[in-house]
Image (tube, rainbow, N blue to C red):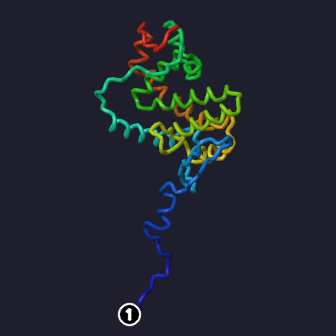
Amino acid sequence: MTEVLYTGPIPAERGGELAMGGGRSETSALSGTGGGRGVTTTQNSQRPNACCFCWCCCCSCSWNEEERRRRRRRKRISQDTKMDAIPNCEACTKPSVEEIRLWSQSFEKLMRNPAGRNVFREFLRTEYSEENMLFWLACEDLKQEINKSAVEEKARSIYEDYISILSPKEVSLDAWVREVINRKMQEPTPHTFEDAQLQIYTLMHRDSYPRFLSSNIYKSLTHGGSRTSSES
């Protein structure tokens, strides 16, 4: 009998080529002008596999990461613990029931209203994703700043609080968005986090907003309840 030898390609071993890109290995040190504090983060040098649709259309990658983060928080925080009052809520007047019902027409109408943002933030807190609203508000505040030193200080504060992987309030962002931020942090401007802010806005719109409209928090308001956190 003639011996037949296999001459085809040899599969790559696990832990070798197939393991590349599995961890965050890239180190990026951010040093700003004016003697600001350095910020160090680690990220992938390779962009993860992209989903089949653009993130702005389906947000599937960000949604999955957000869901995993939310589950981890539920393990750390007892469901039986009473939620504290929301700190640093926006000053606002008490909205009418008619105004509250307008929030269900579009996410934009909700986000344009200070009372709406407070209520939505309260809902996000019950889902352990309040940092999404806090990050969005911080970006809005940064865009109003014109003093260069203040811009640099606020930008680094936002980075440390919401972008750094070491922060407990880290928001879910795609790898390419983080790469853009890391480059822009070399010389921060009021628009350094524009791409990230849009992605988080889209995530809240597609993921959290539909559940908010079905929540007891919102339904109680549409029936004349009062849950707005601050009145003037």
Q: Can residue 166 be seen at all in this image of the molecule? A: yes
In the picture, measured across the screen, residue 129 lies left or right of residue 41, that is left
State the image coordinates of residue 45 (x, y, percent, origin top left).
57, 56
Q: Quadrant of residue 190?
A: top right
Residues packed near mark 1 inside 10 Å, few (<14), some (14 to 19) or many (20 plus): few
Image position of 185 with respect to 22: above or below: above
Q: Quadrant of residue 44?
A: bottom right
Residue projecting furthest to the left? 80
Q: Nearer the viewer, residue 146 or 69?
A: 146
Q: Position of residue 14 (x, y in %)?
A: 43, 67
Frontmost residue, 148 versus 92 = 148
Indicate left or right for 149 with 228 as reference: right
Which of 126 and 5 lies nearest the eye of the viewer? Answer: 126
Report the residue marked by disc 1.
Answer: 1
Q: Amino acid at mark 1?
A: Met
Task: Kindly identify the residue that appears in the image at 54 percent across and 39 percent down.
Answer: 160
The location of residue 36, given as percent across then percent down, is 62, 41
| Residue 142 higher or lower than 109, as above or below | below
Q: Residue at x 69, y 36 (%)?
A: 189
What percent of the width, then of the height, locates residue 72? 37, 40
Badge 1 element:
loop
Q: Residue furthest bottom?
A: 1
Residue at 60% over, 44% down: 177
Point out the image quarter for the N terminus.
bottom left
